[in-house]
Amino acid sequence: MDATNVRDLLYYPVSAQKMVRGEGVFLYDEDGNEYLDCASATFNLSLGYSHPAVIQAMKDQLDVFTHLTSSVQSDPINGLVRRLVEVSPDNLTKVHPKVSGGSTANEGVIKMAQHATGRSEVISLFRSHLGQTMMMTSMSGNAFRKEPFPSLFPRTLQVPDPYCFRCFYGQKQGSCGMMCVDRIEDFLEYASTGQVAAIIVEPISGNGGNIVPPDGYFPKLRAFCDEHDIVLIFDEIQTGIGRTGQMFAAQHFDVEPDAITTAKGLGGSGAQVAAILTNERLAGLPANHHSFTYGANLLAASAANVTLDIVRQPEFLANVRATGNYILGRLADMRTRYPAIADVRGVGLMIGFEITHPDGKPAVKLTNHLAGAAGQHGLILRTSRYGYGNVLKIRPPLILTLDQAELLCDRLENLFRAELAA
């Protein structure tokens, strides 16, 4: 059956392009064209394509067994649990690996918060993307994601995000008094049910536009949650496992949430693995309330163990910071020469830049055009908010070298010269 027929059979749309090989940070199509993957295959490949240590670990595990009931112990799961506790903030001492992806990890941690507090409502942020299950769709900070579905989880509340470039409250960074935290008090008083169990946030928004909170935001949010006895959850599906140059973004922002969810990059080269990390307070949710068949898979756990051993090394994380700083510096320079680039922001290798019209309004059509044209210049780029946003995202595999970072920026320059030059 040829590719055209397969495209007709697939439920979701795909392009006519067929990829045949991946190696490191590069992807190759059937015509031999090379692409530097700035999306890490939907932000999953922290160690890039076909990392030899990850592949070998999975091959070795194949010779033992590939799956096992979670009611007994195994070396891969024991190793994963220990490693996650070792690399997470000190207050997180419990690991729930029986989840099969980021969406189910987020849904599970919310159940834990509801169970522990006896309350039901959950606060999330504008533009947030927390997953694809019905509960997580309900908590999305984007109306277009909820519009088709009549039966959403009702006890959700979205509040303004710390988007300093487009502040909801019309304030200026540094003199705003952090209204994006203070005003949550008003939402509790006037818009909630009075039964808020948790606030769930992405430390740096993934799909929502790579929004980096200002200094002081998270300490103030932590204090707010403590004052109101609200569980603070960090969705680190995208920011975790070294993406910011620390194992978790919580460590970059020097804050201890009550729970962290992790997935995507935890699998290194694409193994499907996820986990919930919590403090002692959130322990105790009965296993029958949240447990998935393909969670705690041994092949995936073996890949995650190798990934954690590699990423946690100080020199590896230092390289993430160095390559990220190089790209941010190059983008800042490009911004001075291409007025359509209105803002550049990021931490480590979680970087985004905003594309606008001359009047400052989001240039969504141009943003999507740039992402589409990037392939002609050897890049794979993704946009924010499923194509509804105006931010281009730079999130290559964390193994990126400085030479490859230079190549990435040179190709970006070529793209901008071709598409943005006056």
Image: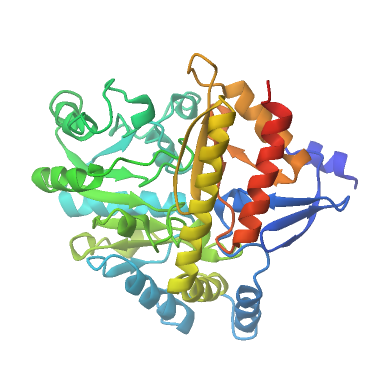
Asked whether residue 37 appears in the rendered view, the answer is: no
Horizontal side of residue 362 vs 164, given as left or right: right
Residue drawn at (28%, 20%), measured in percent from left and top? 170
Q: Position of residue 410 (x, y in %)?
A: 68, 46
Q: Position of residue 345 (x, y in %)?
A: 44, 40
Asked whether residue 131 appears in the rendered view, the answer is: yes
Residue drawn at (60%, 79%), measured in percent from left and top? 57
Residue drawn at (55%, 50%), measured in percent from left and top? 395
Residue at the left extreme of this rendering: 227
Residue 52: quadrant of the picture:
bottom right
Up-down relation of residue 228 to residue 269 (above or below): above
Horizontal side of residue 35 vs 347, given as left or right: right
Horizontal side of residue 173 vs 144, given as left or right: left
User: 198 or 184, which is in the foreground?
Assistant: 184
Up-down relation of residue 50 to residue 410 (above or below): below
Total numbered circles = 0
Horizontal side of residue 236 vs 329, given as left or right: left
Q: Where is residue 3 in the image (x, y as percent from the top left)?
A: 86, 44
